[in-house]
Image: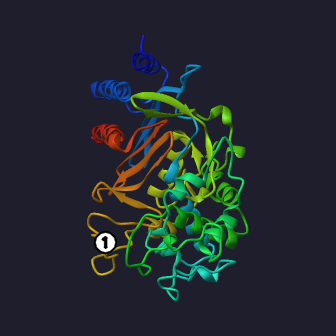
């Protein structure tokens, strides 16, 4: 029996053990199960978990396939996985909490907060703000292949501190300094997605609050949101609950090691479908979760509101088709809000419609080539359409 047939059979069996909290099963539910298991088998996805949130409540959630194909351990909705760039929304929430506490301003020069100074060599007197960092308009950029080749550490958390790395990257004479770390664009005038810019914003939160992001987010987000299994580092989460990671190359599925990343504010959070539902509901519900106001409504509104309009937008952005909140993005021609994420062995979606009526969280523990990226969007769209049907 080949591997893909095993996945299809296993997923069919595990449907009996997965959680479905929709009001009543129907033909559409049966179809979504069949559709997902078929797509998994066709594309080689080892494990998958998903949830649909309707009107700010979990209406459906299930998991399929394996968290460890060698042992046959099932992927379940409490399985942990690094959530890649969806982590930026957690960094954004921490940033906005620090703003709420009066520790930061979105529009202050970042050099006011940093223990070292950052100056774009093309525009050495230009002011960079946290709002610039959070909307990817700072003029600071990721240098490739350095970013992917140097900042991931297999089997362990990064041995280098975040602050030391950023100093070496942005300070003239630093080990990683290059003029290529900067764009030849004034801050605010050009949008280019920057992981290292997000890492810098997270570091500024740490500087101003006196706490690393793991402790700060646990106190102000994870604990009040009952995200009991969520953390930032391999050293602080329950590895027994963590999925194995897989990569598809040349039509073969291979396991890859877990890893840590030096720039953890851009992609280091490890969470589950169950836990991430709590976080997304809080943001969609004006900062409230289970009658607890975790973030002020005005804090969340500023985080989620579109920052660009027709008169104030980067030169390469059309606000009606691409926009940005504070580490909160628009996707699919600005018809969805939230974030998605991709890293070796993982693909994650956390997206809602603009009216916050139907939202989907999707975890996949298998990465594909860039040429097959649409396969993830196919499953996301299947789930979104199912959510629309459930809401009716």
> Left of 282 or right of it: where is 59?
left
Residue visible at 51% across and 84% down in the picture: 127
Q: Residues within 10 Å of mark 1 (few under 14, many from 20)?
A: few
Q: Is residue 118 above or below residue 97?
A: below
Can residue 19 be seen?
no
Residue visible at 42% across and 66% down in the picture: 325
Which part of the image, by quadrant, shows the C terminus?
top left
> Left of 350 or right of it: where is 236?
right
Q: Is residue 219 above or below residue 111?
A: above
For this orientation, the residue located farthest to the top is 1
For this orientation, the residue located farthest to the bottom is 125
Residue 163 location, x and y as percent?
68, 67
Residue 246 location, x and y as percent?
51, 33
Which part of the image, by quadrant, shows the N terminus?
top left
Can residue 348 be seen?
yes
**Count the marks: how many?**
1
Q: Is residue 59 above or below residue 219?
A: above
On the image, which quarter does residue 36 sit in?
A: top left
> Left of 146 or right of it: where is 158?
right
Q: Which residue is mark 1?
A: 316
On the image, which quarter does residue 255 sit in?
A: top right
Residue visible at 67% across and 36% down in the picture: 239
Residue visible at 45% across and 18% down in the picture: 10
Say which element carries label 1. Answer: loop
Residue 126 location, x and y as percent?
49, 86
Residue nearest the observer in this picture, 249 or 97: 249
Residue 46 location, x and y as percent?
47, 28
What colour-coding does the image apply? rainbow
């Amino acid at each position: 029996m080949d591997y893909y047939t095993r996945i299809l059979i296993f997923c069919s069996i595990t449907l009996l053990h997965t959680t479905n909290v929709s009001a009543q099963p129907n033909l559409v539910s049966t179809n979504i199960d069949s559709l997902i298991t078929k797509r998994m088998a066709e594309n080689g996805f080892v494990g998958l978990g998903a949830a649909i949130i309707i009107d700010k409540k979990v209406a459906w959630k299930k998991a399929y396939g394996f968290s460890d194909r060698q042992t046959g351990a099932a992927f379940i909705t409490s399985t942990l996985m690094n959530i890649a760039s969806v982590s930026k929304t957690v960094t954004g929430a921490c940033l906005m909490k620090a703003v709420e506490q009066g520790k930061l301003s979105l529009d202050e020069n970042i050099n006011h907060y940093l223990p070292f100074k950052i100056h774009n060599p093309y525009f050495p007197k230009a002011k960079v703000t946290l709002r610039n960092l959070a909307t990817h308009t700072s003029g600071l950029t990721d240098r490739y292949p350095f970013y992917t080749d140097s900042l991931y550490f297999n089997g362990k958390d990064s041995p280098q501190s975040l602050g030391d790395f950023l100093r070496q990257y942005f300070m003239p004479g630093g080990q990683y300094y290059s003029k290529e770390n900067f764009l030849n664009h004034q801050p605010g005038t050009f949008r280019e997605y920057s992981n290292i810019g997000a890492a810098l914003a997270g570091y500024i939160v740490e500087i101003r609050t006196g706490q690393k992001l793991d402790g700060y987010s646990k106190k102000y987000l994870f604990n009040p949101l009952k995200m009991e299994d969520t953390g930032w580092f391999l050293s602080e989460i329950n590895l027994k609950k963590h999925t194995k990671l897989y990569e598809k190359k040349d039509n073969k599925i291979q396991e890859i090691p877990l890893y840590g990343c030096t720039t953890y504010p851009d992609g280091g959070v490890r969470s589950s479908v169950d836990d991430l539902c709590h976080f997304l509901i809080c943001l969609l519900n004006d900062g409230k979760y289970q009658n607890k106001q975790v973030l002020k409504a005005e804090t969340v509104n500023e985080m989620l509101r579109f920052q660009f309009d027709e008169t104030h937008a980067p030169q390469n952005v059309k606000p009606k088709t691409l926009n940005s909140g504070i580490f909160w993005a628009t996707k699919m021609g600005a018809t969805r809000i939230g974030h998605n994420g991709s890293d070796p062995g993982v693909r994650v979606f956390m997206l809602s419609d603009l009216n916050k009526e139907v939202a989907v969280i999707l975890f996949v523990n298998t990465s594909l080539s860039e040429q097959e990226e649409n396969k993830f969007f196919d499953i996301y769209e299947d789930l979104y359409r199912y959510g629309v049907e459930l809401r009716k």
